[in-house]
Image: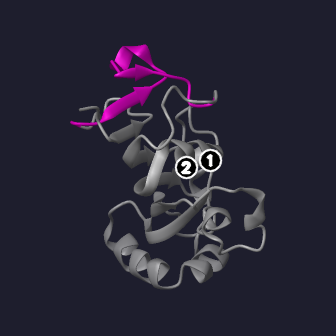
Amino acid sequence: MPATRLNLGCGRKRIEDAVNVDVAKSVGPDVLCDLNRRPWPFTDDRFREVFAYDDVVATMEEIHRISGNGAILRITVPHFSCANTFTDPTHRHQFGWSSFDYFTGEHELSFYSAATFRRRASRIVSFPTFVNKIVWRLANRHPEAYERRWAWMFPAWFLYFELEVVKRPA
């Protein structure tokens, strides 16, 4: 039976029982693929779970296409305040707390994409230091206030989102 889990941009972080995808042949992915080129080499509605750690928003429609209704997407993205310290050349975008609201209907401009997701969980993650543990708790209780007032002083490491694919009957 084919794997129903997909690990996008796996690098050296392979996930067992998943299709591991990367553009770098040297990491030995199951599927060698440039995720910036679409469509991806997968059939519609194939996956039940997608791991997209450090991926970009532009891939959301493709993830929606290849995932079945109710599939879970776990994604991490670099936070916008980390731009100066984020040096991986394959990750050129920074994100804020509301980056995925365009796909959940929580933003006034959500009409730009037909891909729909339901937010299951989200959190701001900071580098683990004593001071950051205090800031992290406050940031996750008040994310909008954190981004407006504190993010530049206490930059987050990355953002974590867990979304559920919502497909409307055709």
Measure how far apart labels 2 and 1 are at the Cα level.
5 Å
Residue at left offset 31%, top offset 72%: 130
Q: Which residue is mark 1?
A: 61
Q: Residue at x 77, y 64 (%)?
A: 111
- What segment carries the magenta color? 16-36
Q: Is residue 18 magenta?
A: yes
Using a 10 Å C-alpha cutoff, classify the residue at mark 1 as few (fewer than 14 neighbours), some (14 to 19) or many (20 or more). Answer: some
6 left or right of 113 in image: left
On the image, which quarter does residue 143 sit in?
bottom right
Tag 1: amino acid: Glu
- 95 drawn magenta: no
User: Helix, strand, or loop for circle 2?
Assistant: helix
Identified by mark 2, the residue type is His
Q: Quadrant of the N terminus?
A: top left
Horizontal and vertical percent position of residue 54: 49, 45
Q: Are marks 2 and 1 in contact (CB under 8 Å)?
A: yes
How is the model colour-coded? Answer: one colour
**SS at mark 1 in the image:** helix
Task: Point out residue 137 in the picture as x, y percentages from the top left corner.
Answer: 39, 80
Q: Tell me if I can see residue 27 in this picture.
A: yes
Q: Residue at x 35, y 30 (%)?
A: 20
Q: Position of residue 149 (x, y in %)?
A: 64, 79
Question: Which quadrant is the C terminus positioned in?
Answer: bottom right
59 over 71 or under it: above or below: above
Tell me the quarter of the picture where residue 105 sits: bottom right
Q: Give the residue at mark 2.
A: 64
- The relative height of residue 6 versus residue 122 in the rendered view (above or below) is above
Q: Is residue 84 visible?
A: no
